[in-house]
Image (spheres, rainbow, N blue to C red):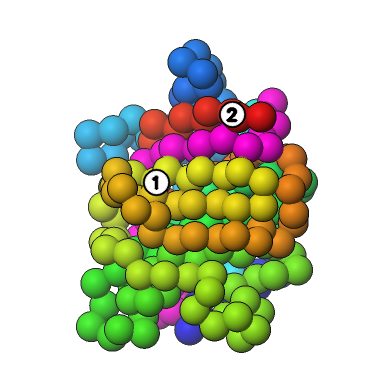
Amino acid sequence: MRPQSPVLTLVLAVAAAFALSLHGQVVPAVEGGERVTYQGKAAVRVASPPGANTVLEVKNMQFHNGTIEVDIAGRPGSGAAEAARGFAGIAFRTKSPERYECIYLRPANGRADDQVRRNHSVQYVSEPEFPWMRLRKEFPEKYESYADLQPGVWTHYRLVVEGVRARLYLNNGEQPALIVNDLKAGDSTGGIALWAGPGTEAHFANLKVTRGN
């Protein structure tokens, strides 16, 4: 089982500063989550309950093309369902907390003793029209891939977006872990958000956005 399309999307409102590096200038960027130190890094902790995605929008950010970098550590939260995988990633070109493009990680799949689960370590979705289950059914294997991930361990995440194309690079790899050539929302503009799926405890650190054209 993977995360069902949730009935509820949470937008956190508890104030906690999160540093964003935007073209070299560091500014407080996100309201929400809990400011903590996790594995030696100043981070925002997001606890997403079962049955809901949690979206933390970056303040005053409009993004079209460019690069988004962040360190992410996701793991199943306390009391999470057996199907929880530590879902964590970045939503981009967001129009609302319910409408966005997103590429997220399933860290608990990365070293599973099951090749099918391993093949589902990284996932693209375009909510609400194209959740993961629709993409997997209509386009099997096209919008997800394998990556060597571990629950609760920092992964460096670098997303490059240009037009209707997106490339995700993990842990400073030279080759993308996932290629999307037809972003379902088209060549659009919107916000950026930290994203955690149902039953997930996620940490985010060192967010950096470099905007292109």
* Residue at the image position 31 percent from the left and 48 percent from the top: 174
- Compare marks 2 and 1 and give the one earlier in the sequence: 1
**Can I make out residue 44 in this image?**
no
Question: Could you tell me if the residues under marks 2 and 1 are in contact, i.e. CB atoms within 8 Å?
Answer: no
Instruction: Identify which residue, 5 or 8, lies in the foreground.
Output: 5
Q: Amino acid at mark 1?
A: Tyr
Query: For the view shown, which residue lies furthest in the top direction?
Result: 25
Which disc, if any, is residue 157? Answer: 1
Q: Position of residue 40 (x, y in %)?
A: 22, 34
Q: Quadrant of the C terminus?
A: top right
Measured in 3D between alpha carbons, the distance from the residue under mark 2 to the one under mark 1, in whole angstroms, is 16 Å
Instruction: Identify which residue, 80 or 143, lies in the foreground.
Output: 143
Instruction: Identify which residue, 17 or 78, lies in the foreground.
Output: 17
**Circle 2 residue:** 211
Q: Position of residue 6 (x, y in %)?
A: 65, 69
Please state if 98 lies on the left or on the right of 201 as rendered. right
* Residue at the image position 56 percent from the left and 60 percent from the top: 180
The label nearer to you, 2 versus 1, is 2
Specify start and end residues of the magenta stretch as a single range.
60-84
Q: Amino acid at mark 2?
A: Arg
The question of residue 71 being in magenta is answered with: yes
Image-quadrant location for residue 113: bottom left
Give the answer, above or below, for where 210 lies relative to 75.
above
**SS for dot 1:** strand
Image-quadrant location for residue 64: top right
* Residue at the image position 55 percent from the left and 52 percent from the top: 166
Q: Position of residue 152 (x, y in %)?
A: 29, 55
Give the answer, above or below, for where 52 lies relative to 13.
below
The question of residue 82 being in magenta is answered with: yes
Q: Residues within 10 Å of mark 1 (few under 14, many from 20)?
A: many
Give the answer, above or below, for where 109 lies relative to 205.
below
Q: Position of residue 185 (x, y in %)?
A: 74, 56
